[in-house]
Amino acid sequence: MNKYLILTIFLLSGCASQDRYVEWETQKPESFPKLTAIGYATLDAQPSKSKSQQVLMAMQASKIAAYRELAEQVYGQELSATSKVNDWMLTDDAIQASVTGIIRGAKVVKSYPAGEHYVTELELDFSQVWALYQQNNRPQTIKSVTYF
């Protein structure tokens, strides 16, 4: 008899959750950090015989390197490591790193040659990221609940 009472209460409580209206409210973060990243690319390492083409390729490579650094700061870096031991001696040690993420709202602060390299500096202002995110996704909290 007692188990039927518990089952009935459980079923009724499940139905009651459908008889309400939830009003949501968007919460703005208290502060917005600014992240910076610098990417470097060697001019001579670019696969072109033309100097102007090497500069353009190094510009792009340094920008990609800076975006990777921003992604590392935002999402972290995944590491995978393996070590091999043979006869109680380390024979092979390998570490792989990868980063996956989407960076929106970053802006190029500076892009310039520096000796044998090309340098790109990026800035990611999270107030801009939040504004972009609000256009697509609206993180919300419960403002009020009305039961019927």
Image (cartoon, rainbow, N blue to C red):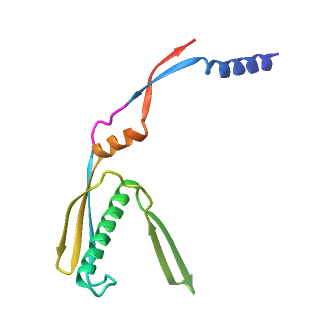
The single residue placed furthest to the top in the displayed view is: 148
Q: Quadrant of the C terminus?
A: top right
> In this picture, is 38 found above or below 143?
below
Span shown in magenta: 27-32
Q: Is residue 87 magenta?
A: no
Residue plotted at (51% across, 83% down): 92
> In this picture, is 52 found above or below 64?
below
What percent of the width, then of the height, locates residue 123?
A: 25, 55
Residue plotted at (75% across, 21% down): 7
Residue plotted at (69% across, 17% down): 12
- From the image, give the main secondary structure of the stretch colored magenta: loop
> In this picture, is 76 found above or below 7?
below
Residue plotted at (30% across, 75% down): 57
What percent of the width, then of the height, locates residue 86?
A: 57, 85
Is residue 139 shown left or right of residue 106? right
Residue 30, quarter of picture: top left
Q: Is residue 31 magenta?
A: yes
> In this picture, is 145 found above or below 31?
above
Q: Quadrant of the N terminus?
A: top right
Is residue 33 shown left or right of residue 132? left
Q: Please tell me which residue lies in front, 57 or 146.
A: 57
What percent of the width, then of the height, locates residue 144?
A: 45, 19
